[in-house]
Image (cartoon, rainbow, N blue to C red):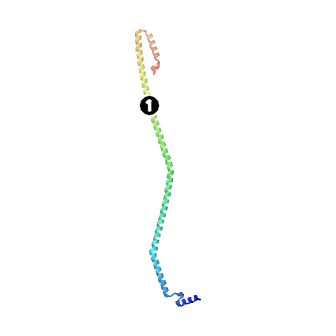
Amino acid sequence: MNGLVRVALAGDALGDYIFGLDPQLLVDSLITMIAMFALFVLLSYLLFNPARTMLEKRQERIREQLDTAAKEKEDAIKFKAEYDAKLKNVDKEAEEILGETRKKAMKKESDIINEAKEESARILDRASREVELEKSKVKDDVKQEIIAVASVMAGKIVASSLNENIQSQLIADTLKEMGDETWLS
């Protein structure tokens, strides 16, 4: 019962207001709400707007970084594709270079061989000319020897006063001794 007495006494103190709302309470509540709204606006201006701005800038920076990363990824993919293509072409280029080098080496080899053949032909030609000169020299020497032998024979013929038949026989014998090849070479 004690509890009922208190509520009744509180009801007497409040008067005839519903839930005990008096005008002072309403004014205080209104002032508190205005103060809270002003505080919210002030905090919004001082704290929330800079925080929003900072968050927007951060979002923009992250968006730019993502765009840059995506672009760099595309570039990396392009560079990788170019690199792979170049790697494939390197083998082909190396084969082409080796082929060209082989062709040049074969051409150089054939040039060297041709030059050697020409040089050997010149050497052989010079050697044959020298052989021909030596043959002519030997022929001249043989003729000189024959002339010398003929002179000696003539001297012997004159000395022995032989007749013509014996002279012819001596010349024929001498020529046979020297041989026909001496005159032909």
- Of the 4 image quadrants, the one containing the C terminus is top left
Front-most of 22 and 68? 22
Tell me residue 176's x, y (percent): 47, 16
**Residue drawn at (44%, 33%) of the image:** 119
**Residue drawn at (49%, 54%) of the image:** 83
Q: Is residue 128 left or right of residue 16?
A: left
**Residue drawn at (50%, 55%) of the image:** 80
Front-most of 178 and 45? 45
**In this rendering, is residue 75 above or below 32?**
above
Residue that carries the numbered disc 1 in the rendered image: 123
Q: Report the amino acid beneath label 1.
A: Ile
For this orientation, the residue located farthest to the front is 2
| Crowd around label 1: few <14 · some 14–19 · many ≥20 (10 Å) | few
**In this rendering, is residue 91 above or below 138?**
below
Tell me residue 121's x, y (percent): 45, 32
Tell me residue 180's x, y (percent): 47, 18
**In this rendering, is residue 183 above or below 102?**
above
**Residue drawn at (48%, 62%) of the image:** 69
Tell me residue 117's x, y (percent): 46, 34
SS for dot 1: helix
For this orientation, the residue located farthest to the right is 1
Q: What is the count of numbered marks?
A: 1
- Of the 4 image quadrants, the one containing the N terminus is bottom right
**In this rendering, is residue 101 above or below 168?**
below
